[in-house]
């Protein structure tokens, strides 16, 4: 099993996929699924039906998880880090 090095609160850069080049903060990490939720990356919309009579339906926007292999850690100065060079905090 591979060690999961990305933690909640880390700043990462997306290195693959439709959002390649975007920088964001990790909002959630799912080590068992090897996925992370990054703020501002992989935004999706869900259309919700009204729950009661008289209510209106709504569109909710949220961020979906992406594979952890598609992101790269950054240090405080914005320099990209390799997975073996993580700064000890």
Image (cartoon, helix red, strand yellow):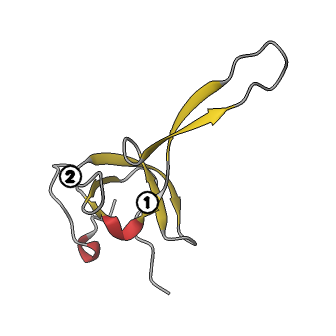
Residue at 36%, 53% (x, y): give it.
Answer: 10
Q: Horizontally, is 38 left or right of 62 in the view?
A: left
Could you say where residue 50 lies in the image, as x and y percent from the top left?
75, 24
**Which dot marks residue 66?**
1
Could you say where residue 53 lies in the image, as x and y percent from the top left?
85, 17
| Nearest the eye: 2 or 60 | 60
| Nearest the eye: 60 or 9 | 60
Task: Count how many numbered circles sit on residues in the image.
Answer: 2
| Nearest the eye: 7 or 57 | 57
Q: Horizontally, is 6 left or right of 62 in the view?
A: left
Could you say where residue 4 lies in the image, as x and y percent from the top left?
45, 73
Q: Quadrant of residue 58?
A: top right
Residue at 58%, 72% (x, y): give it.
Answer: 32
* SS for dot 1: strand
Residue 50, above or below 38: above
* SS for dot 2: loop
Residue 1, above or below 52: below
Q: CA distance from mark 2 to mark 1?
A: 14 Å
Q: Horizontally, is 36 left or right of 82 in the view?
A: right
Residue 61, above or below 32: above
Q: Horizontally, is 49 left or right of 58 in the view?
A: right
Residue 27, above or below 69: above
Q: Residues within 10 Å of mark 1 (few under 14, many from 20)?
A: many
Residue at 22%, 55% (x, y): give it.
Answer: 75
Name the residue beneath numbered marker 2. Answer: 21
Residue at 80%, 12% (x, y): give it.
Answer: 54
Sequence-wise, the earlier of marks 2 and 1 is 2
């Amino acid at each position: 099993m591979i060690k999961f090095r990305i933690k909640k609160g880390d700043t990462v850069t997306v290195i693959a996929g439709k959002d390649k080049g975007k920088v964001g903060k990790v909002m959630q990490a799912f080590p068992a699924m090897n996925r992370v939720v990054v703020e501002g990356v992989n935004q999706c919309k869900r259309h919700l039906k009204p729950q009661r009579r008289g209510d209106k339906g709504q569109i909710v926007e949220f961020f979906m998880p992406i594979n952890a292999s598609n992101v790269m850690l950054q240090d405080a100065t914005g320099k990209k880090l390799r997975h073996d060079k993580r700064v000890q905090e």
